[in-house]
Image (cartoon, rainbow, N blue to C red):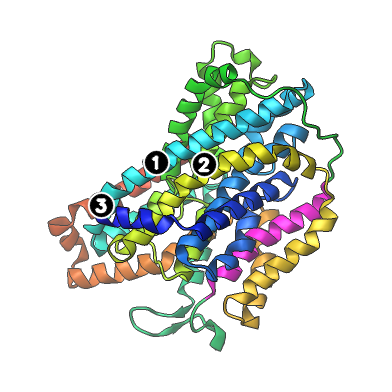
Amino acid sequence: MFEQFITGFGMAMRLDTFLLMGAGLFGGMLVGALPGFTTLMAMAILLPISFFLDPVVGIPFLLGVYKGGIFGGSIPAILISMPGTGAAVATSRDGYQLTKQGKSRKALDMALFSSVFGDTASDIFTIFMIFPIAFLVMQFGPPELFAVLLLSLVIIAATSGSSPVKSLIMMAVGLWLSFIGTDPMGGVERFTFGLFDLKSGIPLLPMLIGVFAIPEIAGVVIRNEKAQKLATLMGERLTRMEFFGSFRTICRSTVIGTGIGIVPGLGQVVAAMMGYAAAKNASDHPETFGEGDLEGVAAAEAANNAVNGPTMVPLLTLGIPGDNVTAILLGAFVAQGLRPGPQLFEEQGATVFAILIAMVFANLMFLVIGYLSIPFFSRLVMIKTSILIPVVIMFAFAGAYVFRSDTFDLLMLVGFGIFGLLAKAGKFDVMPMVMGFILGPPMEYAFGQTIAMGNGDSIGFLFNERLFALGLLAATPVIGFILWRRMQTVPSD
């Protein structure tokens, strides 16, 4: 794999890769800085652009949007107490208080530097960890793969939303949707209802845009977001002493975010809250948290950005998205002919390492672009969303149509958009549904192969030859229950 790493390093050193990553970073920050708009919306709408680019250009472009959007959400959180992303909720606690004290520039600088440090450290960790994990995963057979995928679905159901029952219902819906089309083992049509367009299954892209982007757009319209408060950039820049005074907190939050990023289903919001809570508990002056403490901003931003890199570990090695955004990244990989999973490193190892290496260089660009453009982005919070909504809707429909040029995909977009709105109204998290839809086919195929390997006695086969898979299957309900109980103790906003 070391040879693939060296080859990948050379592949990443392309001018168009850096230019598109820079555009993605700027675009992500732009969307994140607009109150009511989210990184998830930006990723879903801009996903089709990556289809027309080389994989080592298109996917780093989306990663740039991802990284820039997570930081961009902290800008309205700090300036007008209106988090641009869910991960920025913890940032707003101290960030807006600092703005009221005339220290908004210090808060934004701390958010930027903490984000870059957490992101860079976790990306480097990802590159080092991907070697042994990929080697281990290559030893997996169908039973082990089925057990890991089932465990991942249980973890996602246990950690998504506040109701495990609702999460399980949504996951069941996703699994059922994944069965629509032609059976990969027997070639039999299932649940197509006589529709020719469903023979090849439900298209992934219209689903992603429908359930993620449409409800977000509708939410902005319904809320009629306004920047009632004056957003101004005030005060002096962050000093070196102030940054290093919070360095221990930044390192702690980076470790927390990195650990959470590896576990599918948790994501930036949980990381930010846990990083903030850990910093407050470890502080000598916990009473200042929530009153305008730079350490609170550092803790939240380092933790939520440290999630970005490690989410790629389960995505690339097992094909398991860690959160909603990496589910969209999975769509980009599949559209580029790069199917994440155990064989990806054998077949496309150099390309994968090129993408991971580009992630690290993106952080250097992230620092420069963010530092120079903070004054510009701080003014965007005043733009009326009524001007932006029509453009966003146009991009959503164009993106759903352009990949296959099929009008059926537009119907799918509308259908899943309505489904997403109903789910949001009923407080059902769509994350388990999307994960069930994505992981259903490989899990079904691995299950079928396991049955075939057992020759009618699958339990005996697992006992005699696949104890690791059997152990994972036995531990799955226990792990799911423990994780769900722990999630109930995560601080909420």
Q: Secondary structure at mark 3?
A: helix
- From which residue to which does the magenta span run? 202-225
Judged by depth in the image, the label closer to the viewer, 2 or 1, is 2
Give the percent coordinates (x, y) of residue 265.
48, 48
Q: Residue at x 71, y 50 (%)?
A: 37
Is 317 or 367 nearer to us in this picture?
367
In the picture of the structure, the residue carrying the numbered disc 1 is: 124
Q: Residue at label 3? A: 2
Q: Residue at x 84, y 41 (%)?
A: 227
Quadrant of the frame with the C terminus? top right
Q: Is residue 383 left or right of residue 461?
A: right
What secondary structure is the magenta-colored segment mainly? helix
Q: Quadrant of residue 109?
A: top right
Q: Nearer the viewer, residue 278 or 91?
A: 91
Amino acid identity at mark 1: Ile
Task: Identify which residue is drawn at 43% across, 43% down.
Answer: 123
Looking at the image, the residue that sits furthest to the top is 284
Q: Secondary structure at mark 2?
A: helix
The residue tagged 2 is: 364
Q: Nearer the viewer, mark 3 or mark 1?
A: 3
Total numbered labels placed on residues in the image: 3
Q: Is residue 212 magenta?
A: yes
Which quadrant, please, contains the N terminus? bottom left
Q: CA distance from mark 3 to mark 1?
A: 15 Å
